[in-house]
Image (cartoon, rainbow, N blue to C red):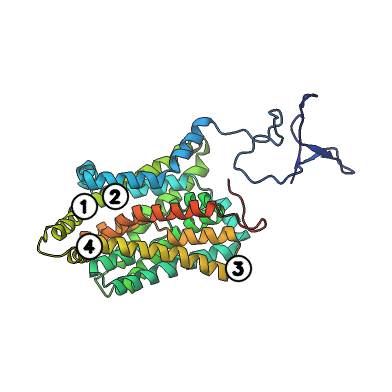
Amino acid sequence: MSFTLTHRLCLSPPQRTHLRFTFKPHTSKPIVSSPSKLSYRPIVSSLSHNSEHLSVTQAKPRWENMLSTAASFYPLYVTVGGIVACFKPSAFAWFVERGPSSYSFSLGLIMLAMGLTLELKDLLNLFTQRPLSILFGCVAQYTIMPTFAMVISKTLGLSPSLSVGLILLGCCPGGAASTVVTFIARGDVSLSTVMTVCTTLGAVILTPLLTVILAGTYVPVDAIGLSISTLQVVVAPVLLGSYLQSTFPLVVKMITPFAPLFAVLLSSLLACSIFSGNVVRFKSSIVNASLASDASLVSRLQSLLSGDLSAVILSVMLLHFTGFFVGYISAAICRFREAERRAISIEVGMQNSSLGVVLATTHFTSPVVALPGAMSAVIMNIMGSSLGFFWRQISGSKQELEDQD
């Protein structure tokens, strides 16, 4: 890997460096190459070891790195929030009482923060460079998850409300947290980002359409209402954020470092609030099973496992596990690179559960419909992060696996 120097070279004589110079005919600029391959990093502060004079790009301020690090702890925030919701659901009462309008407004802000960090011109360039992998990932997103959501709901014999909630979750686009998990897993981050944007834009048509086809046999589904809500709370804020990014770049540049952490905290609040609103239902099923004093331990466990709590947990875990597994296997069969396989697997397996919660609370009367989406926010991030850290410990081949650190 070589760099053409455009900066002044200032190396002190006694200092050792690992740079060597190669001069080519008919050129006046020296070429600097390193004996070892330099892995890609978002910020390259120096090309030589123990040298602070040769700077290629200016490093980010420390506070920006701290904000980025804090945003990467999204799974931890959701998990802690879920624990708080279990023991003290009243902590989220101020947010739940203002629903579903508070849910829709929060999701709109999350998508706006996502749009502020996007440049559609760069995304279009990536799409033209790698159309096959992007199209494959988007098709996998809207075929694997909706299909297996219906299969799981029928196999487990879920109630109509839970079945609709699970299918609605499976028909949602990829979640923004998938990019963070893809980075942890050393996957193709650019592919994950483009897939998230494409599936989000396609959700206006595909999410209502697939929900009507797969869940319409359980309860009436308002496809037009779902489409309008998706346009209002997801697509429009993303496009608005991208427009602001290109129109007011200086203002957006000041806000952008805070956008990921803001979106992460708001997503955690949204998911945990929905979960806290249904904690009473979960606790009642546990209490009813434990109060059956005349029943045996096996009977109590069967009663507990037959309740809404176990049904939601089991169905959501199976859905996300299937998305991760089938997404990776299908990408491997199509002979994509290892980094692309991981990105596709994570993108397929991780859904925009916040959108599922908003659509469920807005367009369905039963509060049970929102349970799969709320539980998914906790389970999905734990499963996805665990998979990401597992993959991070596994090194792919030198030509296939790109180091995204």
What kind of element bears circle 1?
A: helix
**Hey, which quadrant is residue 360 in on the image?**
bottom left
Q: Is residue 227 above or below residue 56?
A: below
Q: Is residue 331 above or below residue 258?
A: below
**Hey, which quadrant is residue 374 in on the image?**
bottom left
Residue 401 visible in image: yes
Q: Tell me if label 2 and label 1 are in contact, CB under 8 Å.
A: no
Left or right of 191? Residue 108 is: left
CA separation, marks 2 and 1?
18 Å
Q: Can you give x and y, in whole percent of width and height, for residue 327 in the image?
A: 49, 65
Residue 335's disc number = 3
What kind of element bears circle 4?
A: helix
Q: Which residue is mark 1?
A: 279
CA separation, marks 1 and 3?
44 Å
Earlier sequence position, callout 2 versus callout 4: 2
Q: Which residue is mark 2?
A: 103
Q: Which residue is mark 4?
A: 308
Earlier sequence position, callout 1 versus callout 3: 1
Identified by mark 2, the residue type is: Tyr
- Binning the other alpha carbons within 10 Å of mark 1 as few (below 14), some (14 to 19) or many (20 upward) gives some
CA separation, marks 3 and 4?
40 Å
What kind of element bears circle 3?
A: loop
CA separation, marks 4 and 1?
11 Å
What kind of element bears circle 2?
A: helix
Earlier sequence position, callout 4 versus callout 1: 1
The residue mark sitting in front, 2 or 4, is 4
Which residue is at a point 59% across and 65% down the rendered structure image? 336
Q: Can you give x and y, in whole percent of width and height, for residue 88 in the image?
A: 21, 43
Q: Tell me if label 2 and label 4 are in contact, CB under 8 Å.
A: no
The residue mark sitting in front, 3 or 2, is 3
